Amino acid sequence: MRYVVLLLALAACNTVKEDLPGQSRIKAEAYGYTFNVFPADPDFQVVRTNMGLPKRDTFALAVAAAVKQATGCEVAEGSLKGDYNLTRGKMRCP
């Protein structure tokens, strides 16, 4: 029973945390991180899916690169919020 609860908890960690229209998951890799990007123009959510300790100096760059790779849009300056596991922000699309 303990393992079932643990598996359910881990599965919940990789889902979008708010209702966003168009919650399609797009996998992206950047700076050694793997992400699931959930875009809903102009908003997005990024869930980090790899294990390990993130590096503070490259994490925001990795999120921005993953969003660009997944959507073709830039991250709006100053819009990133959240932590190393779930990051939210706004996109600027051409």
Image: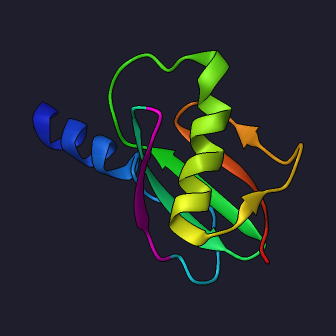
Q: Position of residue 53 (x, y in %)?
A: 44, 16
Question: Residue 79 location in percent, x, y?
Answer: 85, 48
Q: Quadrant of residue 10?
A: top left
Specify whether residue 17 is in view.
no
* Number of numbered tags placed on the structure image: 0
Residue 92 visible, this angle: yes
User: Looking at the picture, does residue 86 appear above or below residue 40?
Assistant: above
Q: Residue at x 55, y 17 (%)?
A: 55
Q: Residue at x 49, y 48 (%)?
A: 47
In this rendering, the answer to whether 59 lies above or below 25 is: above
Seen in the picture, residue 4 relative to 83 is either above or below; the reply is below
| Quadrant of the drawing holding the N terminus | top left
* Residue found 53% across the figure and 60% down from its top: 69
Residue 64 falls left or right of residue 6: right
80 vs 7, left or right, is right
Q: Which residues are magenta?
A: 24-31
Residue 24 image position (x, y, % from top left)? 47, 76
Q: Is residue 78 magenta?
A: no
Q: Is residue 29 magenta?
A: yes
Dominant secondary structure of the residues highlighted in magenta in the image: strand
Q: Quadrant of residue 73?
A: bottom right
Apparent side of residue 20 relative to residue 16 in the rendered image (left or right):
right
Which quadrant does the C terminus fall into? bottom right
Left or right: residue 22 versus residue 42 is left
